[in-house]
Image (cartoon, rainbow, N blue to C red):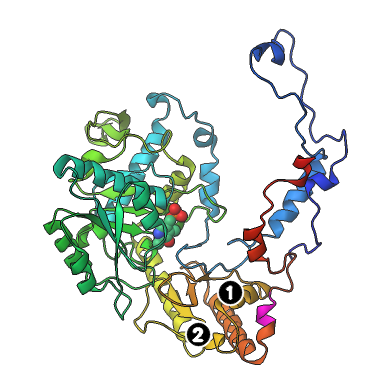
Amino acid sequence: MRATENPLPTLFEISQPGREGVEAPPIPDGLPELDDCLSGVKLRQSALNLPEVGELDGVRHYTRLSQRNMSIDTEFYPLGSCTMKYNPRINEAIASLKGFSQAHPLAKEEEIQGWLAVFFQLQQILAEVSGLPHVSLQPAAGAHGELTALMMFKAYHEEHHPNEKNVILIPDSAHGTNPSSCTIAGFKTREVKSGGDGTVDMESFREALKDDVAGMMITNPNTLGIFEPQIAEISEALHSVDAFLYMDGANMNAIMGITRPGDFGVDVMHYNLHKTFSTPHGGGGPGAGPIACTDKLEPFLPVPRIEEVSSQQNGLSPTYRLSQDHPSSIGKVRTHFGNSGILLRALVYALAHGPEDLKQVSQIAVLNANYIRKRLEGEFHLPFSTDCMHEVVFTARHQKAFGARALDIAKRLIDLGYHPPTIYFPLVVHEALMIEPTETETLQTLDSFCDAMLQIAEEAKQNPELLQNAPQLQPVKRLDEVQAVKSPILVCPCDTE
Ligand SMILES: *Cc1c(COP(=O)(O)O)cnc(C)c1O
C-alpha cells in the first residue's frame, strides 16, 4: 500500500542543526588543503542551506516518496504513445556490471572494446529491424533523433538545392515534438490534414507538396493507432521532388518484426529505445533515440562512427575503432556515445528476445489493444472504426454528456489503482483517451482494467461528481492547475530567507 500520511514532511522540515548522515574521512596527510587547491577561485561565502538529517531519515524520506509514485513496477500504466512496458531486471543486472558501469567516458578506444562491441551490435540490430542500413546511436531521445535527422536534411539540401527547400510537411495528428523539432532546425512547417479514417488525406498531401518541401515527418502507425496504408505512395511523391520521408518511430512496438520502414520508402527514422526496447522511462529520462537512414543520407550522420576493423572471419576477434573522417557529417549531437546505459539495456532486451520473439512482441501488443477496444467500445465512443494497432483511441463523448470529461475519468482511474491513459492527445480528437496496454500485461490485468473503465462509465451516468472530485484516496488530491500556471511557486521557501 502506498503511504498516505499527508502531507509528507520535506527534508527541510525534519532537518536538525548539526545532524549528519555520513561523516567524511579526514584528508590524509600530505594532500594539499582544499582551500589551497581552489585559491583564486571565487568561493561561496555563506553556507548552503541544505537539510541536516541522519542516514535513516534520508532513506525513509525517499523510500516513502517513491511509494507515492505510480510506476510500471506497481501499477498497470496504459499511457498511450509511451509504450510503458515492463523492464526486465536482467537489463539492470547487466547494465550494472562494473566493466560497463565504471568505464570512463574518455577511455581510449582499445580500453573500451567491449562497449564498442555493444554499440556496433545494437546498430546492426536496429538497421535490420528498420530495413535502413546506417545507424547513429547518439541522439538522447526521440525528439533529439528528429532534430538530428532534420539537420541532416538541411545539410543535404544545402549541398543540392541551396535556399530552395525550407518546408517540412506534418500531418495534423502528429506528436508536438515533430513541429517543434522543425522549428529548432530552422524549417517552416506545413500541415497536412487527416481524412475521415484517421490517415493522411492524400488530396491535402498533394496540395501541400511543392518544390519548397524538404521532407515530411510521418508517425507510422500514426498517433491514432492506425497504420498509414498510403505510405509508399507518399514516399514516391516526396522523392519525385527530392524531398525525404522521415518516420517518427515511437510506435515501432506495433510493427517491429512484421514490416520494415526502409521497405515502405522511409529515408530516416528514429527509435525510442526507451519505449520499444524496454529500458526505464517516465521520470523524464535518460532515454535514447537512435536514428537509422538510407545510403543517400549516410554521409551526414553524426560522428564519431564505430567501425569494425577486423572480423571473426579471418580468425581474429572483431575489433572496433572510432572514425571522425566524414567531411559531410553534421558533427556530434551528444557527448561521448549517447546514453550508453540505455543502449546496453536495449541490446540485452533485443538479444534476450531474438528475432521471432521481437515479432511476437508486436503481435501481442496489437492483440491486447484490440482486446481492450472490443471490451470497451459499447460504453466509450470510438472516433475511428478501423481496427487499431498497438493502442486504441476512445473519447469521453458519452460521459461528457453527463458532465464527466476525459480528465475526470483519468483522475478516477488513479483511485481505482491504475495509471491514467494519455488524454487530450492526439489533438485532432476531442476528449481523447488513448490507451496503450503493451504486450507485457496478462489477460487478467487487461480484464480488471476494462472492468474499472466500465465501472467508471456507469459512475459517470449515476454520479458524475464522484469523477469530478477524484482522486479522493491519494495523498495529493486534484491540483489547481489554473493557480499553478498563474502564480507558480518556483523557489523553495527556505531559500528566500
Ligand atoms: C514519445 C514520442 C516522441 C518523443 O520521444 P521522446 O523520446 O520523449 O523525445 C515523439 N513522437 C511520438 C509519436 C512519441 O510517442
Q: Is residue 407 visible?
A: yes
Q: Residues within 10 Å of mark 1 (few under 14, many from 20)?
A: many
Whole-percent x, y for residue 98 in the image: 54, 34
Residue 397, numbered circle:
2
Residue 15 located left or right of residue 40: right
- Magenta residue span: 466-470
Q: Residue furthest front?
A: 486
Q: Position of residue 86 (x, y in %)?
A: 52, 61
Dot 1 falls on a residue whose secondary structure is: helix
The type of residue carrying mark 2 is Arg
User: Along the line of sight, which residue is nearer the eye, 353 or 136?
Assistant: 136
* Res 213 quadrant in image: bottom left
Alpha carbon of mark 2 to alpha carbon of mark 1: how far? 12 Å
- For ligand 1, the image quadrant comes to bottom left
Q: Is residue 344 left or right of residue 477?
A: left
**Is 128 drawn above or below residue 113 in the view shown?**
below
Q: Which residue is mark 1?
A: 407
238 falls in the magenta region: no
